[in-house]
Amino acid sequence: MAETRTKRNTPNDDGPRLDVLVAGAGYVGLASAVSIRQAQPNLKVAVVDAAPAGVWERDTRASAIAAAASRMLGQLGCWDEIAPEAQAITEMIVTDSRTTDPVRPVFLTFDGEVAPGEPFAHMVANKVLNKALRRRAAELDIDIIEGVAVQAFERGPAAMTIHLADGIVVNARLLVAADGVNSKLRAMAGIKTVDIDYGQSGIVCTVLHERPHNGRAEEHFLPAGPFAILPLTGDRSSIVWTERTEDANRLVASDDLVFEMELEQRFGLKLGEIRVEGKPRAWPLGLKLARGFVAPRLALAGDAAHGIHPIAGQGLNLGFKDVAALAETIVEADRLGQDIGAIDVLERYERWRRFDTVQMGVTTDILNRMFSNDFGPLRAIRDIGLGLVDRMPRMKEFFIRQASGLSGDTPRLLKGEAI
C-alpha cells in the first residue's frame, strides 16, 4: 500500500506553498495529482481528503473502466498493477421486459474490440484502482493528507489561501475540487448546479454464482429502472440495480432471504445458484450538472462537476476525461510560462469538457425516462429502435467507440500518449 504522508507546518508560519492542491482522494482526485506531477515534475502537488485514513480499503464497489481510461492508467504507470484483477467485458446484451415475463428477449448485443486484444471496457474493484493510484502518488512524492477537510479559502492575485480543518493554512496556485457530487468546495465557490431528482436509488452489491459469466455484461430495462449485471474476476458479478427510492430502501433493509429472492427474480438462473457477497447498499440517483466548471484558481473535476445516472456506466469515465483534459491544460500552460490558476487558462479546460458532459447528462436523462416505465406504446417504439440498431453494424461500432471513450476531441492521456 502506498505511504500516506502527513507533513505539517505549524499554524504560526505562512503555510506550505504548493502549485496544485487537490481536494478529494478518490480515483479522480488521485489521478489528477498523478497526471499533473508525472508530466511536469517541477510542479508541487498534494492531495487532501476529508475521509478518515483507510476508508477507501472498505469500498466494496466496482467500476467500468473504458478502453480510453485503461490507456490513461497505463500511461500513468498503474495499469500493469490493475490488469491482473481486472475483468474484460467481451460482450454485452440489452433486454427490455418486466420482472414477471417468463422470457426476456435480447434486442441488442455488443461485442468486439476497439483494437486487437483490447476490449472496450473492463470491470475493476474501486479499492484496486485506488491502491494503484496511491502507490504511484507515493512514487511521485505526492503528499496525501487524510481525515482533514478544506474549511475555507480566499483567492489572492497569485495564489489561493486554503484553510484546513486542523488549523493548517496552505497556499496553492490552483485548487482542484474532486470532492464528490455533493462538493462543499463547489458550494463555497458559489457555483450553482442544475439538479433533477429521479426518485430512484441504485442498489449496488456483488454476487457469487455457480457458472462462469464468460465476460458477458447484461443490462435489463425493467419498469422501475435498469438492472445491470457486470462481470468481475472469478465467478462473480457486480449488480447495479435501479429501483424507486422507497422500494430500494425497503430492499436493502430487508433480511438476506427476502433480498436474494427479489434479486434472483431479476438475475435469473442462467448462472446457477447465486449468493450475495457482503451487505447491499443504496444511493439516491439524479442528474446534477455544475453551471460552471471553473472559477479563479479553482477547477471542478469528476462528480463535483457532474453527477449522472448509471444507465450508461459512464460516470467514472467522464471523471477520467476531466482528469486528462485538466492535466493537459495545466501542464501546457506551465510549459508556456502561464499562470496555471488564471481564469483564462482554466476556461480552456471548461470549454473542452463542458459540451461533452452536458451531452452525456442529457443522454442519460432521456434514456432513463424512456426506459424506466411500462407504457405500452413507448415500449414498442424503443424495442423497435433497439432491434434496428442491432441490425446496423456501423451504428453499433459507433456506440462501442462512444462507450470506449475514444470518440470526439480526446486528450492525449486517453489515447495512451504522454502529455
Image (cartoon, rainbow, N blue to C red):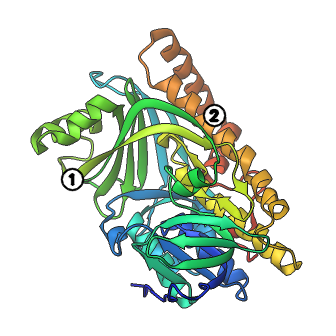
Residue depicted at x 61% and y 26%: 388
Residue depicted at x 75% and y 61%: 296
Q: Amino acid at mark 2?
A: Val
Mark 1: secondary structure: strand
Residue under numbered circle 2: 362
Answer left or right for 18 relative to 201: right
Q: Nearer the viewer, residue 297 or 303?
A: 297
Question: Residue 164: x, y in percent?
Answer: 50, 72
Question: Residue 299: x, y in percent?
Answer: 68, 60
Residue 340's disc is: none
Residue depicted at x 43% and y 75%: 166
Question: Residue 130: x, y in percent?
Answer: 45, 71
> Residues under labels 2 and 1: Cα distance?
32 Å
Question: Residue 156: x, y in percent?
Answer: 74, 69
Mark 2: secondary structure: helix
Crowding near pointer 2: few (<14 within 10 Å), some, many (20+)? some
In the rendered structure, which disc, 2 or 1, sits on the residue that comes first in sequence?
1
Q: Quadrant of the C terminus?
A: bottom right
Q: Amino acid at mark 1?
A: Lys
- Above or below, comparing residue 278 to residue 161 in the picture: above
Q: Quarter of the image holding residue 59?
A: bottom left
Residue under numbered circle 1: 279
Answer left or right for 343 relative to 210: right
Answer left or right for 371 relative to 157: left
- Above or below, comparing residue 108 to residue 152 in the picture: above
Q: Nearer the viewer, residue 290 or 211?
A: 290
Number of marks drawn: 2
Q: Is residue 317 visible?
A: no
Residue depicted at x 68% and y 39%: 359
